[in-house]
Image (cartoon, rainbow, N blue to C red):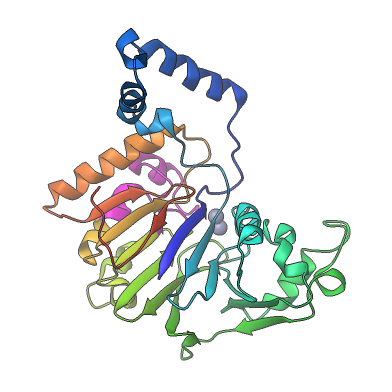
Amino acid sequence: MRIRFWGVRGSYPTPMHPEVLREKISTVVQRIRPRDLETQDSRERFLAGLPEWLYGTPGGNTPCIEVRLNDGTCIILDAGTGMIPLSRALAKEKQAPGSYHVFISHFHYDHIQGLPFFGQAYHPSIHMHYYSPVPDLEFILKDHMQHPYFPITMEDKMTKNQFFHCIDRQQEVRIGNAVITWISLNHPGGSYAYKIREGNKTFIYATDIELCEQDFDPAGSKRLFFNEADALVMDTMYTLGESIEKYNWGHSSFSLGVEFAVQCNIKQFFLFHHEPNYTDKQLYSNLHAARWYAQRQKSSMIIKLAEEGTVINPGELQTS
Ligand SMILES: [Zn+2]
Ligand SMILES: [Zn+2]
């Protein structure tokens, strides 16, 4: 199983403002010393030494994650605007998949607004499978893609090979050699986490979740679902202070997320659904605070910021 982040930002797309880009360039220029420019090696060393918030960006697209199973099967977690660059990348693949399996965490705009622009879904030979525990899955998706919200409909223009799977709790979804299960999350209107197990590796996608006290119960359903995952992507939108201010908004702080992941003995933990108001610098500062917080709990869990373009393999532990 190989996982790639295409959209990591919460709530709404956050393209980089020209002012922010200018500030980044200006800060980099101020750091250059003449000897940094002398050779190709020195230039590369200089760039590699820049802080991650300056040289890169986590990206501004809303949630979309690609999961490729070992046999090449393509699972897509959420259909935020990250689904648009995913579609472009798939169009360049020589042997792109003929079927896509799209699991929707819930139907807030940031999790479905890329779907109308997923070019593959318009090709008559492509098979599109949609999954959710919500019985109205088909109605909701078709309803949001019609006049006056969008000029064309799923029924008229997209492939006729579209299948809507409402999954219930007893039912495991089997796709290729993978087994997918789900659990409901605390979020206004509901949201669902998906666990993908292939071979002996487990990956969990849990976005739009406000962790609460009972989630920490060692015998509770949440702990049993999350325990021992090789990689967990979790909504850690806020700082602790902001999560208190925004109690009941349906998102977690990174510190509570770390605490939960440590208790579940997660191996790799990815901070996700980044607050659109936070600067890149603030997001990376949250990452460092999260690592410090895990170390204080004597945990060796690897913690990373979900960034567009990052590829992870839950079977291979990476150092942080
Ligand atoms: Zn969201
Ligand atoms: Zn939401």
Task: Work out whether 234 lies above or below 274.
Answer: below
**Rendering quadrant holding ligand 1:** bottom right
Residue 296 shown left or right of residue 211 in the figure: left
Residue 297 in the image: state x and y as whole percent: 14, 52
Task: Work out whether 99 lies above or below 44.
Answer: below
> Who's the residue at 49% across and 19% down the image?
25
Q: Quadrant of residue 88?
A: bottom right
> Who's the residue at 33% across and 23% down the image?
46
> Who's the residue at 79% across and 80% down the image?
160
Stretch of the chain drawn in magenta: 234-258
Query: In the rendered image, is residue 184 in sight?
Result: yes
Query: In the rendered image, is residue 211 in sight?
Result: no
Residue 76 in the image: state x and y as whole percent: 55, 67
Residue 251 shown left or right of residue 256 in the figure: right
Q: How many circles with numbers are drawn on the protein? A: 0
Q: Quadrant of residue 143?
A: bottom right
Task: Work out whether 112 lies above or below 243.
Answer: below
Along the line of sight, which residue is nearer the eye, 110 or 230? 230
Along the line of sight, which residue is nearer the eye, 118 or 255? 118
Residue 180 shown left or right of residue 37 in the figure: right
The question of residue 246 being in magenta is answered with yes
Residue 210 in the image: state x and y as whole percent: 42, 58
Along the line of sight, which residue is nearer the eye, 33 or 313? 33
Extreme residue in the top direction: 34
> Who's the residue at 40% across and 71% down the image?
1
Q: Quadrant of residue 97?
A: bottom right
The question of residue 207 being in magenta is answered with no
